[in-house]
Amino acid sequence: MIGVVQNLRKGQDAVNIGFDQSYSLGDHIAFDQFLLAIERNFLLHITTCLNMTVVGLAMFRFFSSHKNDLYAEIGILFFVIAFLIVLKGTRDYIGMLKILRRIPMGLKE
């Protein structure tokens, strides 16, 4: 399955990769497990973003005494990193969904 996804990322069509229309129950289960792994990875990105936001808020609010403090700068840095993490996770998730829609037994629109 991973080799198929890598070939689809390169822009090859699903028919040229060698898909046939006879899928076993094991193929459908493997595809569903792959889809669940992609969704779990996306949720881990969101969880990491929320954790980084909480750490940034704690650094910014509770440990800084004035605006020019180092803790305030570290807190703002954590906010920026959290935003970048959620952007990366969203980009990866949407990209994988586009790839999976090109597989014949994949996602339907």
Image (spheres, rainbow, N blue to C red):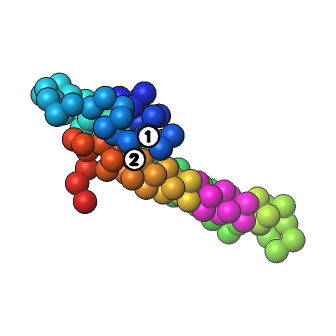
Element assignment for label 2:
helix
Residue type at tag 2 = Ile
**In front: mark 1 or mark 2?**
1
Q: Residue 73, located in which quarter of the rendered image?
A: bottom right
- Above or below 73: residue 6: above
> Residue 10 versus residue 64: which sits nearer the camera?
10
Q: 9 left or right of 61?
A: left
- Above or below 1: residue 80: below
- Asked whether residue 35 is in view, the answer is no
Element assignment for label 1:
loop
Mark 1 surroundings: few (<14), some (14-19) or many (≥20) residues within 10 A: some
Q: 57 left or right of 105?
A: right
- Above or below 18: residue 43: below
Separation of residues labelled 1 and 2 (CA atoms): 11 Å
Name the residue rendered at 56%, 53% in the picture: 88
Q: Given contact means CB atoms under 8 Å apart, are the residues at marks 1 and 2 in contact?
A: no
Say which residue label 2 marks: 99
Q: Residue furthest right?
A: 68
Residue stretch rendered in magenta on the structure: 75-85
Residue type at tag 1 = Gln
Say which residue label 1 marks: 12
- Asked whether residue 28 is in view, the answer is yes
- Image quadrant holding the N terminus, namely top left
Magenta stretch, main secondary structure, is helix
Q: Which mark is residue 37?
A: none
Name the residue rendered at 46%, 52% in the picture: 95
Q: Position of residue 55 (x, y in %)?
A: 62, 56
Which of the marked residues, 1 or 2, is nearer the chain's N terminus?
Answer: 1
- Above or below 42: residue 84: below
